[in-house]
Amino acid sequence: MRLYISDDAAALACGAGRVAARAEALGVELFRTSSWGLHWLEPLVEIESGGARIGYGRVAPGEVAALLDGALEHKRIGDVASHPFIARQTRLTFARAGRTRPLSLDDYAATGGWIGLKRARAIGAGAIVEEVKTSGLRGRGGAGFPAGIKWETARRAPVPRKYIVCNADEGDSGTFADRTLMEGDPFCLIEGMAIAGLAVGADKGFVYIRSEYPHAIAKMEAAVRLSAALVAPFAIEVRVGAGAYVCGEETSLLNSLEGRRGEVRAKPPLPAIEGLFGCPTVVNNVLTLAAVPWILANGGQAYADFGAGKSRGTMPIQLAGNIRHAGLFETAFGLTLGELVHDIGGGTASGRPVKAVQVGGPLGAYFPPSLFDTVFDYEAFAARDGLVGHAGIVVFDDSVDMAAQARFAFQFCAAESCGKCTPCRLGAVRGYETMERMIAGEDPAANLALVEELCETMTFGSLCALGGLTPYPVMSAIRHFPEDFAR
C-alpha cells in the first residue's frame, strides 16, 4: 500500500504535513506529490492499491490509522481524476497536477516533459515564434498582450545580449496558480523559459519570486539545479523580491532585479527593446511561460483550437473568498462568470446569497449577479469595464459592505504605490480620506462626486496600472451597489 499526499503550501496550511508525518510513523510508503487543486478537500490523501488511487478528503492526522484500516469510508471521494471538479476541466498547463512528484525528473519526462524543448531546438527561433503567434497565447498575468508579438520584438532587436524574465511576483488577492505551478511542476516553467530563450536568442533567465513564497523558492532553486544540464546553454537564476506589489509591474520588477528601487519606468522604451540592464528582455508571468511547452509539443493551432474569440487556449482560474469549492480550475475561455461561481464553485461557503465577485485581483472590478452572464474572456470583461488579469475570482456574500471595499482599494493603492507619479501617490491617499468622510455620512453627494473626479485623474494620469486601475474596484462598487453608498 502506498499513500500520496501533496506538499503544496495550501495543503500544508491545512495540515497535510502532519498527516504525512503520521503516515510515515506508521511505516507506510509515502509519495509527496503536486496538488490537484481541490483546496476545499485538503488534506487530501490517496491510497494506491491494486493499481488504483482512491482519494479521501479532509483527513486529520488522528484519522490515518483508521484510513489504513478501511474505516474512513465516509471521507472517500473515489478516483480523484474522475471527480466532477477535475473531470470538467481542460488541463493543458496543469496536466501533471496531482499526478507527479514535483522534483522528479523521471516523472516529468514520463509525462511529456522536454518534448516541447526538443522540438523547439529542431525548428529554430523563427518557427518557435510563429508557433506561439499561431497559438494566440496572451499574457496570463495582466493586460493580455500577445506573447508572440513580444517575443518577435525581442528576437528582432539587433543586440547580442538578451534576457528572459519570469514574473513570479504573484501578489493579487485570491491568486495562487503561479505558486501552485512552481511548487508542483517547476520543470514545466523551466522548459518554457528555455524555449523562450531559444526563440529570442537569450542564454540567461531570471525567475523573480516574492519572499512570501518560501516553498516555491525552494522548489524552483532545487529544480534549476537538477535540470541545469538539460536546458544548457540556457541558464536560470532565482531571485527573491521583498514583496512590493508594484514589482509585479514589469519595469518596476526590472529595476528591482538590477538592485534598484522598485519603481515604475516611463515607457517607451518597452522592455522587449530596452529592458534588464538596458538589453532586450522578454517579461512574461509563470502561467504564460508554462503554457509554452504544450504549445511547442502539440502545435500552436492545437492550442488555438481551445477558447473563445481572441482569447485562445486555457486559463487556470483560481476560485477563492467566500466560496464552497475553493481551488484551481483550468478551462478553455468561454464559460460564463455565473457558471464558474455557482456550477463550479458551488456558491458561497456561508450559504448566503452572492452579492459581488471581484475578478483580477485588488485592482479588478466588482461584478454583481446581474453581470454573471459575462463570458470569461478578455474582450467580454473589458466591454463591461472589468479585467481578467491573473484570473483570480474572489466571492463575497450579501454581508459585505461595498463602500468599505471601495475604501480598501484606495487604502491598498496608497500602501503599495512606488510614489513616482502624483496621481497614484497622492490620489490614493486623498481617495481614502474622501471615502472615510463619505462612510461617516459627511456630505455624501459632494464627496461621491469628488471620488469620481479623482478616479478619472488617476485613470488617465498614472504611470502604471497600480494607479490607473485602482478606479476599477472603486467605480464598479459605486455603479453596481449604490445602496451601500447612501449614508
Image (cartoon, grey):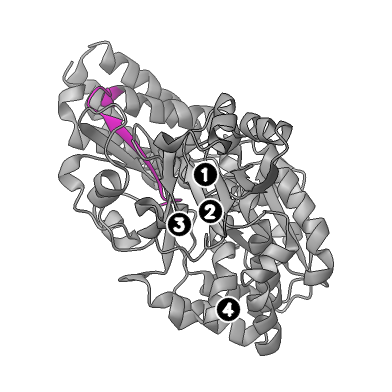
Q: Which amino acid lies under the numbered mark 4 shown in the image of this protein? A: Leu
Give whichever of 292, 458 is nearer the camera.
Answer: 292
In the rendered structure, which disc, 4 or 3, sits on the residue that comes first in sequence? 3
The label number, if any, that marks residue 176 in the structure image: 1
Neighbourhood count class around disc 1 (C-alpha, 10 Å): few under 14, some 14–19, many 20 upward: many
* Mark 4, residue position: 296
The residue sitting at 63% across, 35% down in the picture is: 243
* Mark 3, residue position: 81
**Residue 110 drawn at (x, y percent):** 66, 70
Q: Which amino acid lies under the numbered mark 3 shown in the image of this protein? A: Ala
**Residue 2 drawn at (x, y percent):** 64, 48
Q: Which amino acid lies under the numbered mark 1 shown in the image of this protein? A: Phe
| Left or right, residue 164 beside residue 444 | right
Give whichever of 67, 478 is nearer the camera.
Answer: 67
Neighbourhood count class around disc 2 (C-alpha, 10 Å): few under 14, some 14–19, many 20 upward: some
Q: Secondary structure at mark 1?
A: loop
* Mark 2, residue position: 53
In the rendered structure, which disc, 1 or 4, sits on the residue that comes first in sequence? 1
